Image (spheres, grey):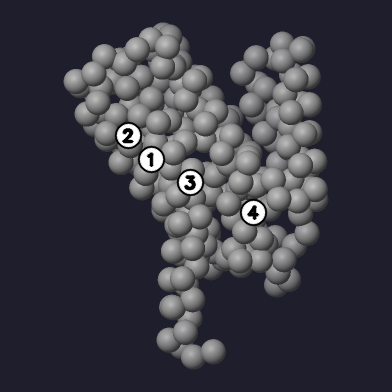
Amino acid sequence: MSVRTVPNLARSSFMHGFRAVLPLWLGAAPFALAYAVAAQQAGWHPLEIQLMSLTVYSAPAQLSAVQMVAGGLPMISAIMTAVAVNLHQALYGVSLAHRMRFSRAERIISVYLLTDAAYGVSIAAETQANAYFLLGAEVSLFLVWNVSTLAGLLVGQVIDVPAWLHVEFVSPLMFLMLLISMLKAKRDVMVALLALVLTLICFAIGIGSLTVLVVGISAALIGAWLTKPLVAQP
């Protein structure tokens, strides 16, 4: 393989990953709009709202922070909640490390931009996915999330958003579309059914918001265990 071929392959993989998550824009965009509008209505400054999308870049964490601060809870509680709801990202990293090779720089960038959706499409792509594919998916979602946050700030200035348009109504769209795109093998169906059963059990015993944490970590562990490494580890 020539030296010139490597950048071409990297560019092709990046664009493949970028395009792979385009259908999920339909779920991510209204989610970001809802976050921006909710934060504005809670009294946050527009710069704070946009900066959070650029730095925290986590839909559950951002929306939890808005809801908790608006409810009068201290910021430290919002920060701890944000950390808790994103603990499953560490398991995503373990799973991806068994499937792809990363340089130090690629690892740092990928960790910062990693989301449920980017992980999902990369796993669904199987042998076609590599570090550049993952990065393309991550950049694609980062772009639409921040552009939609900005759009939400503008919309919130001129439109009175109806009370029924809550986060609880918008957020399932993105995850439903992600789930549908991933169900391609018996293993995927098994993990999805397990997550459903665990969710119903958590609702039955009444653990409230901990349901997301328990189900997310449990299903991710099972998925990682069922996933065979695609590359040999050094």
Sort mark 2 into few (<14), some (14-19) or many (20+) by Cα contacts within 10 Å. Answer: many
Kind of residue indicated by mark 2:
Thr
Identify the residue at horizontal 65%, vertical 28% (top origin).
213
- Mark 1 vs 4, N-terminal side: 4
Kind of residue indicated by mark 3:
Pro
Q: Above or below — where is 161 with respect to 150?
A: above
Q: Above or below — where is 98 with respect to 7?
A: above
Q: The residue tagged with tag 3: helix, strand or loop?
A: helix
Question: Does the residue at mark 1 contact the one at mark 3 (Cβ under 8 Å)?
Answer: no
Q: Is residue 229 left or right of residue 52?
A: right
Q: Residue 124 shows which numbered tag?
A: 4
Sort mark 3 into few (<14), some (14-19) or many (20+) by Cα contacts within 10 Å. Answer: few
Question: Does the residue at mark 1 contact the one at mark 2 (Cβ under 8 Å)?
Answer: yes
Q: The residue tagged with tag 1: helix, strand or loop?
A: helix
Q: Is residue 158 left or right of residue 193?
A: left
Identify the residue at horizontal 33%, vertical 27% (top origin).
36
Identify the residue at horizontal 27%, vertical 34% (top origin).
151
Q: Residue 23 shows which numbered tag?
A: 3
> From mark 4 to mark 3, how far is it between C-alphas?
14 Å
- Mark 4 vs 3, N-terminal side: 3
> From mark 1 to mark 4, how far is it between C-alphas?
22 Å
Per the image, the residue denoted by label 2 is 149
